[in-house]
Each structure stands twice: as C-alpha cells, then as structure tokens.
Image (spheres, grey):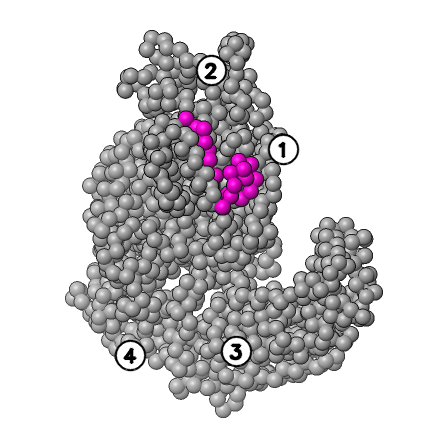
Amino acid sequence: MIHSLFLINSSGDIFLEKHWKSVVSRSVCDYFFEAQERATEAENVPPVIPTPHHYLLSVYRHKIFFVAVIQTEVPPLFVIEFLHRVVDTFQDYFGVCSEPVIKDNVVVVYEVLEEMLDNGFPLATESNILKELIKPPTILRTVVNTITGSTNVGDQLPTGQLSVVPWRRTGVKYTNNEAYFDVIEEIDAIIDKSGSTITAEIQGVIDACVKLTGMPDLTLSFMNPRLLDDVSFHPCVRFKRWESERILSFIPPDGNFRLLSYHVSAQNLVAIPVYVKHSINFRDSSSLGRFEITVGPKQTMGKAIEGVIVTSQMPKGVLNMSLTPSQGMHTFDPVTKMLSWDVGKINPQKLPSLKGTMSLQAGASKPDENPTINLQFKIQQLAISGLKVNRLDMYGEKYKPFKGIKYMTKAGKFQVRT
Amino acid sequence: MTDSKYFTTTKKGEIFELKAELNSDKKEKKKEAVKKVIASMTVGKDVSALFPDVVNCMQTDNLELKKLVYLYLMNYAKSQPDMAIMAVNTFVKDCEDPNPLIRALAVRTMGCIRVDKITEYLCEPLRKCLKDEDPYVRKTAAVCVAKLHDINAQLVEDQGFLDTLKDLISDSNPMVVANAVAALSEIAESHPSSNLLDLNPQSINKLLTALNECTEWGQIFILDCLANYTPKDDREAQSICERVTPRLSHANSAVVLSAVKVLMKFMEMLSKDLDYYGTLLKKLAPPLVTLLSAEPELQYVALRNINLIVQKRPEILKHEMKVFFVKYNDPIYVKLEKLDIMIRLASQANIAQVLAELKEYATEVDVDFVRKAVRAIGRCAIKVEQSAERCVSTLLDLIQTKVNYVVQEAIVVIKDIFRKYPNKYESVIATLCENLDSLDEPEARAAMIWIVGEYAERIDNADELLESFLEGFHDESTQVQLQLLTAIVKLFLKKPTETQELVQQVLSLATQDSDNPDLRDRGYIYWRLLSTDPVAAKEVVLAEKPLISEETDLIEPTLLDELICYIGTLASVYHKPPSAFVEGGRGVVHKSLPPRSASSESTESPEAAPTGAPSAEQPDVIPPQGDLLGDLLNLDLGPPVSGPPLATSSVQMGAVDLLGGGLDSLIGSTNFTAPPAAAVPANLGAPIGSGLSDLFDLTSGVGTLSGSYVAPKAVWLPAMKAKGLEISGTFTRQVGSISMDLQLTNKALQVMTDFAIQFNRNSFGLAPAAPLQVHAPLSPNQTVEISLPLSTVGSVMKMEPLNNLQVAVKNNIDVFYFSTLYPLHILFVEDGKMDRQMFLGTWKDIPNENEAQFQIRDCPLNAEAVSSKLQSSNIFTIAKRNVEGQDMLYQSLKLTNGIWVLAELRIQPGNPSLTDLELSLKCRAPEVSQHVYQAYETILKN
C-alpha cells in the first residue's frame, strides 16, 4: 500500500514528507526530479515513475506535485484517486491548497494525513468524518483554544464512521433548511477547419449543497432520465432504485458534495452553441501575415453566451501581432506566443471580431503547424443536453426545506482547428 | 496565528530550547513544544535527540497531545529501541481505555513501531482488540496484523492471528470485512504459496454482500480479492458478474477499474452465445469511456489498461474511436497512448476518420508525437488493406511539407508498406528519391537505400544514387553500411554490366577497410557467393521476402491473458507480468484466465486446460515417455521379462534402432538424441534386481533410471523473460560424457532461428563441447529437444553456490541469460574407485576438521541397494563392515577436476523405524562436501 508521501513545489523543493510505514529516504525523489527535468512542462511529467526499489506515483495540482511512494504491487488508480482526495481535503480544510497554506498549517496537515491512512490503508477520507476527528482551523477556534486550552482534535468516535451511512454525521441541525442542486455541463469538442464537428461530448455533474436537519431521505427525478446512460454516483445513491425506476434516491451527506456525474457522447445530442470563423494566413518568406477571427452563436436555445475567452498558442515564428478587437480586451505574449482575447458577452446583432496583422520572422519559411483556437464560454440557465429535473421530494423529516435547482453550460476542452 | 511560527526558532540551541519547553510544567507550553518538534520532523529535520523528553509527554488525557506524541514515536522509535520500551506501558493501558477511539489509536500506533522488543508486548492487546466489541477497534486491529506480519511473520503465525483474521471475513460489519481482506491480501502477497485467501462460494457470498456496504477503498480490496477466485462453473461466474456490475457506476475510478478486471476475467468463462455475454460487453464500454474524461493521470492509467482490453476484446470499444481523438493540450503521455489505441481500433469502417485525424496530428508541434503519428499512418496502411492507397497518398502529402523529421519518418514507414504490398506503390519512388539529400537519420537513410536496392531495376539512376552514399561510407552508422552493401549487391545482380565497379568498391570497403565484424562477414559472404556461383547468389540475395505481419506490436497471447488478470495494477501499466519487475524476487504466482466452460458440467480443475495460459509452473516432464513405452511393448518382450541383463540389452538395441540411431552414436552422444532414448542404453550393465520392475519403473519417469540419476526437466528460462522462448532442461551423464538436455519451446508469434549458447566461467570448467544445433527454424508453438554435449575443459572460476552455471542463449530475437544449478554427480568420473590401502591412508591424511557429517532421512534401503544405486552414478563402494548390527559402507568418488571425496555411510538395516542414513564425508576441498551430500540424497531418493 502507500508507503510515503512527498509534497514538492515547482522549484523542486520537498516541503513536506509523511511516512506511513518505515521511513523512505527523500533521495528517492531524485528519480522524480530527473523525470521532471526531461519533461518540458510540469503537466508532462509521467504519472508513474519506476525506480530500482520503489514506484513513484504523482499528481500535479495547484502547482504542487503530490508524490506517493509505493513498494509493492498496488493499483495505481487507487493511489492517484487517493492523492486527489488529499488535495480535495486540504482545499476543504484551508480554503485553498497551496504551499504557504500547507506550511502554515503543517501540524493539522500532518494529523489529517495520519488520519487518512493507516499503514497505507485508507482510514477516513470522507471530509465529514475527518472534520469531526480533526477540526479545521478557524480564527475563532484558535482564539478559543488559546484561552481555554482545549484542542482541535475531537475525542469522540465520529458517528458516521461505522454507520450504514458513513457519509453523514448524526445530530445535524440547521435553522434554515435548504437543498440546492447545480446541474453543470461542460462541452468537450474538437471542431475542424471547415467548421464541422469531429468529436463532441458533454461531461455533466450535479453538485449539491444540502443543509438539512436530521436524517432526510431525498428523491430526485428527471423529465428525461433516458439521457443518463453513463453515470457515476456518489455512494449515497441507491443503485437498485435507479436501475428499476430511474429515480435518484439517497440520504445526502451534509454540506457540499457531487451527487453524480454523467457523460453524454451520442453526437446528435450534443449541440454546439458557438462557431468561430477564422482566416489565418502565413505567407512564405514574407514578414507579414493576416489574422482574423469572428465568434458567433449557433445553437443556444435562445440563451445568451457570456464569459467568452479565446486563446490560441501561435507558432514560434510569430514575432508580434497588431490586432484590433471589435469588443473586449486582447493580449499577445511575444515570449510564450500566447494570444488571449477576453470577449465577454456575444451580441448576436453585432458579432465580435478580432483582426489585424502578424509580424513574422523575416526570411523564415512559413510555420509547419497551424494554431488551434481554444474557446471558453458560459451559458446560464441551460443544460445543453436538455436534462431537466422533474421534482425533488424529501421523506423522513417533518419540516419543509427550501429547494433550488440551477442549470449552467460551460466550455470544457473546446478546440477549433485552423 | 499559524503553524509557520513553529519553524522560526533561534538558530543556536534550537534543540536545547525545545528540550526546556518539553519539560515545562505548563500543559499549553508542552503542547506547543511538541508541535514544534513535529513541524521540524515533517520537513525532514532530525529531532531524534529529544526522544526521552517527548515520550515523557505521552501520559496525558489530552488526546491531541497524545496523538502528536504517537506521531513522533512512529517516526523515531526505530532509532531509539531501548527508549521506545518506556512507552509500552502506556500503550497497554490505552488498549483498555473505555473510549474506543483511544483503544484503536493505541493498537494502531503500536503496530507502527517497528521494534522487535515492542512487538512481544503487542500480542496480547492485539488479540483483545481483534475481538473488541466495537467494530472501529476491530477494523483497526485487522490492519495491525498486517503490520505485525511485516515486522515478524513467524510471530503472527505462531500466535494464530492469521486464523483470527480469516474469521473476520465473516464479521457483521462490512468495514471490518474489507480491512480483513486488505490485510490478508497484503500478507498473501509476501507469501504467495500460503493459502490465506482460500475462497469458497460461502466466503464469496459474504464478500459480495460486504461489497455493497463498505467504503470505496474497501470495495477496491474486495474486488481485487474476488478477481483471484475461480468460479466453479459459468453459472457461478455469471451470478458474481451480475453482483459486481453496479460497481461500474462508482465515482471512484479505481473501483471501476477493479470491477472491470473481475468482469473481464470471469467473462472468459461465459459462453459467447449467452445473452448475458452480450449485455456485459455493452455495459463495459461506457465506464471505460468515462475514465477518459477524468484527470490526465487517471486517463493515463486507464489508457494503458484499455490498450490491453482492446487487444483482448476489441468488440467492447469498436464504436468508441472518437473518444481517443487527441486534444492539443493533452499531456504528451496521454497523447501517445491515445494514438496507440486509435491504431488498434482502426478498421475499414472508421479508417477515413482516423487518417484525417492522424494527418492533423502530423502538423502538431511536439516532435515525438508527430513522428508517432506518421508511423501510425504506416501501421494503418499495413493493418487495413483497403486503406493502403489513401495512407500512401497521405504520406506523400506529408513528404511535400518538407518538414525534415516528417519526411524521414514517412520514408521509414513507406518501406514497411512496400514490404507488405510489393509491386503496388512503386510509382511513389520518384518522389522519395527527390528527398534523398534531406535524410540525416540512419533509420531513414537505411530505409531509403533498401528501397533503391529493392527496386533498382525501375530506378534509372539507381547506381548514381547508391554511389552518392558510398562516398561517406565510413561515416555512416552500421545499419546504413549493411543496407548499402546489400543494396549494391542487389543492384549488381540486377544490372551486372554497368555496376561491376561499384560492387567491387563496396566489397573492398566492407571487407578491407572496416573494423566491424558483421559488416566484414557479410562482405565476404557476398564476395564468395558472387565469385563462386552467381546463380546461387541471385537466389539467395534476391529471394522473395516473407510479407511482414499485420501488427508487429501485439502483446503475445499468453502474456496478454496474464496481464488481463492484472488489470488496474502496475503490471497493467508496464505491460509486463509482476514477476518481471516486482522487488525482491518474492515468488510471484502467475495468474491465468479461467477456462471457458461450455456447460456447467465441466468441473475439472482450472489448471488442467487453461486457454493458452502460461505453463511456466508445470514444466512438461518429457512428454514422449508414453510413446517410448509403447515402442518397447511392441517388441517381443516375452523372455526379457525375467530379466537377465543380457536380454535387457537386446531390448534396448531394438529400442535404439526404432529411434533410428546407432548405439555408437548414442554412447558418443554427440548427435541429436531424444532424451528418453538416450536414457535407455544407460541400463546396459547396470545391476538390475528385476527386469520387470525396472521396465515398469521406466514408465514412471526418467528419475528411476539405473544410470546416473537424471532429474526431470525443470524450466530454466520462462517464456515471459525471453520474449517467448522457453527453455527447460536437465543434466545427464552417460558413459563418461556429460550432456545438457534441453527442450526449447517457441511461445512467441514469430519464427526463431540462429540459436547459440555460451556458458559463463564456472567452478568446474563446464563448457559446451559442440555448438547448439537447432536444425530447422523453430516455428511458433514448436518444441525441440536437444542434447548438448559438455566438456570440463573450459575456464574455471569459483561460483557461489559452487554448482551455479550461468548460461547465455542467443537467437535471432535477442540474447537471454539464465542461471541454473547442476547436480554435482554429473561430475563423478568412472575411475573413481580408490584402492583399499590408499583409501585408508588418504582417510587418515585428511585432517579431521575437513570431515562433514550429514543425515539422509527416510531412506529405507539396505546396503546392497544403496551401493548399487550409488555405483550407477559413479560412487564406488570399497569396503563394507558390519558393526553392532549397523552396516558401514566405505566409498570413494572422484570429480572431473581430480578431487577425491571419501565417504563413510552408516546404515541400520532390519530396523524399519530407523531409516536415516548417516554420511561422513572427507575431502581436501571441504566446500564440495555439501554438494556431494546433496548428490547422495538425490540419487538415493530417486
């Protein structure tokens, strides 16, 4: 199982180490540094690195490498999933997961890590339970602790730890009982030069924020549950009920959690809400090139497209760009060759465009690669797949909760080739 | 106020300051001090000097302080074992605490203190905690057993903790079950032979019930454990699959992949006609696709596994090509994997899409990725015949881009396309020739030269082109030089008139001016061929080439089946079986897929008929045995049954003739001899009690031959380690000559040729006396038996152990190394009988400290049987004495290098309860004694 964990910042310093079995010398990280050097970018460091006696499995999040050391045959996904869980827990505890924050809270971090794994076996990874064992630091608690001498380590066995619903603690109380659900869909797509769709798929999630007293039992039904044929559920969802009735029935965890994630890949179900018209011309042995892009709405079901940002990695041969946008701001970094255009909202009557010239390296032949345009956008009040919640009911408790459902569509990895 | 303050102390006397604070009376100050210590520890500072002071803080009701001290203890107890004992009392007390949290914490921490002395005190508390009323304590204790086993395995077994752990599998709490399974799996991994996780339908049922209720991590452990179970029939397999399928919708990708493993393995048992089989196939695709939308690290592991799944069952993902299309900002390791899978899924139906994508990738920025994309186009052409033309035209388009590395890569793959579809696309040669000058990589140059040589008759200026390469001949890499030599010889054979000068030039460059033996040899061969028989030369050099196979990078079926059993593990990421990389040579059990059972009746053991599963575990023990027996029985065996040696020998003559070889050749044993046949003449002149029993003995294996004992063949080099070549073998000694009987099996997909063998220097100078002769190429799944004669005149180097032999075997694929231990008795020479007087003298001469005593247990033989058995292996009895009802045998033997070994063997006949023999050995080189004793034992016991 998981032997040790090293946290390494982007400049290659190990700033935290934790061992769950015998101590593994930090020199084992040298193999990681080698791999890091070979990879041009931090994102490209391979996630599994063999060394003569150990294996290093790593994830890169928030500019920190989380490097787990294992010695025996352990499922790598198990380790990687666990590392993600560590990142999530830190974020949950401290608001952000960054080197200074971890250093500031090093003792809590250490206590939490010890609670998460025992001898390399996961012990408590649900944040509800962890928070009962080790209270997250808040300014108030620190003050109280200093005055009263009490601790931020709970001395009661967490109630959820062994119950049938390990994700929920007992005795939850709220004065305002509310349950919010966000249906968020991201479109991943590759659009080719001519504007036709090569691949398009929707990654959807339903994130919930449930603050309900007691042990509520919720059911959530959809207008069109048939859309959901590829789903992953939070452990609280009763699978049998879903299989037979297509209804989500569950006792929710307390607070924020992801109820389910789903995947819609049938091409005809994925509407493409925007289009990009582009004309990028490099000419052989000329020092000037022309550049023009226009963004417009396509299938938006009448909703406005907001928060549009266009980015593109230009070829090395582009020295500078002189462009004029019809709206928004644009920047070009001549060092990284990254063009970024913050468009904002698309007005269908007056389509935003960005045009101008590129100055190219004189005398060089035209670049081999064509830049790919990356698009970000948001559409409020719309789930592009058409998924709609029918109703939400609560059983088991007597009060009337406040319920809310929000829809949103975003661009995921949305790429237009030129 | 944050914890960063713990790092800011005055530089001088940091430890001193902490010490003072730790011993402070104020609780609060103490706690702050411990926190400072922990903070220093986390960043790798050595604070072990504070050990006694920190341990003093342990006796406290403050849970946080207690936890902190425990953290410290776990880290440093190893370096201060004596001090750690001080903590034991507190631990034992805490294990009795009314608060389950504290009981669990104590037992958990104790397990983490890796100090032998402490483990003794751990046993009692642990036993109590395993039976604790609180499940939280039980589940913590379960893991503790695994920890303790890691420190002291014997103790865990002696204390019976393993049985308690097994009982926990039936615990009422699913979390306890999951942890017990996890602990048992970890223990089982270090003891592959132990039957810890002995699963039966009842325990499986319990696991499946727990599966629904335990945490995500517990589900992983249980699923991985289920995957090791072999259901007794297809109905059981189906019912398990049905209960595992819901896990495919889990949010944790590791759970999903472990479930996929169970399903992929058990599917093997389901009949393909079953409706359920189809349903299952359909259910597998969506979760695999979903894995690809996760974080890049997860994607990578998923892709490596999908690569295996696609090779085993392409039908699962055949409609999902598009999810493998590459996004430009995918990390490079994801890109390369996706590309690989795209090619595996390429078919006539989707080839147009795939090609369009690949062409797009070929214009990307990352050089490695672009190269692989160009190669992929070539592989598509070879895989999907209908697409070859489009691929070639795509490649030509790419060559037009003139991007240097794209052009080179394209030329390399076009060469492969030519080899797959000869005489079809030669029209493109002209375009290729235009790019001759831009090629600077050896592989591309060699490919281009090959094309020019192969199609010399269609290229008008072939001689000029090749001549241009010849100018810088010595600066080229060997690959290019060899290719150039061959190409020019081809050209000469096709257009002899104009190119005589050129061929002369290249031959002299290769043979006279080159230091490279390969190049020189090939040069000489061509030279002789051309000068002696140009017609033969033409036949050899211009022979029709075999077409290259469709997919050259498929994983071998046996390996693939094994890897399917390892889905989701490191093995699946490396595409190697765990035995190939797992640390410490812990015996790893090979896993194999269960056999497909057509109906529920076939309840035979799963090992009996694995569908192409690796057979490394069960080496074939000379399969032709039965045939030989048949041959013998076909003879008129009437008279010899009563068994005088003479009659037996006539039988053997017959047998030998049947096998088509003369006796002489067998005795010389320089020719190829099938080992069973070779074993028969060893009966000649051997003292045989009863011919009948002897003949019957023959049937039970080679082990009972009365010649020098021959061990059954063992696998020396498993196929996994040698790219499909499996070698098993044994050593024999017959009539003065030693030989190594080998059995070579080709378990790869390609033909093997060019075998050669070499030994490293060894203790007795063993060396092959003749080259390894495999007469015909070894085609896939073929086995040959070879007897390799050995001499003892090779160079000598003392090995450890003494009888270790390191062997290198080469074939057309690679060179492989293995080492084996040879039994010492193959070195016992025939003239090892010492004169009686000399024996006495030598016995006295050798100092007593050189005498070694051994016991041979359970050997119910009398003196006669013993001495005749030994004599056939060249251990000679010189004298026999009866002392107080015990038979003493005095024996001598001589090794090939002239070392004498003298022996005294004490036998107690007539007392059936005393069947142990006592052996004293005296020798001037006492280090051989141990091995001589082993030889005695093997000879007498077989």
Do circles 2 and 4 both sit on a common chain? no
Does the magenta segment cover residue A417? no
Q: Nearer the viewer, mark 2 or mark 4?
A: 2
Q: Nearer the viewer, mark 1 or mark 2?
A: 2
Q: Is residue A286 left or right of residue B583?
A: right
As measured in the structure, the alpha-carbon distance from the residue carrying label 2 to the one carrying label 4 is 97 Å
| Percent x, y of residue B459 | 73, 75
The residue under label 2 is: B878
| Percent x, y of residue A344 | 50, 79
Q: Chain of mark 1?
A: B
* Residue A259 visible at all: no
Residue bounds of the magenta highlight: B660-687
User: What residue appears at the point 42 percent right and 67 percent down from the top-left corner?
Assistant: B314
Q: Which mark sits nearer the N-terminus, 1 or 2?
A: 1
Q: Could you say which is closer to the camera, residue B651 or residue A124?
A: B651
As measured in the structure, the alpha-carbon distance from the residue carrying label 4 to the one carrying label 3 is 42 Å
| Amino acid on which disc 2 is placed | Ile
The residue under label 1 is: B794
Does the magenta segment cover residue B682? yes
The residue under label 3 is: B386
The residue under label 4 is: A224
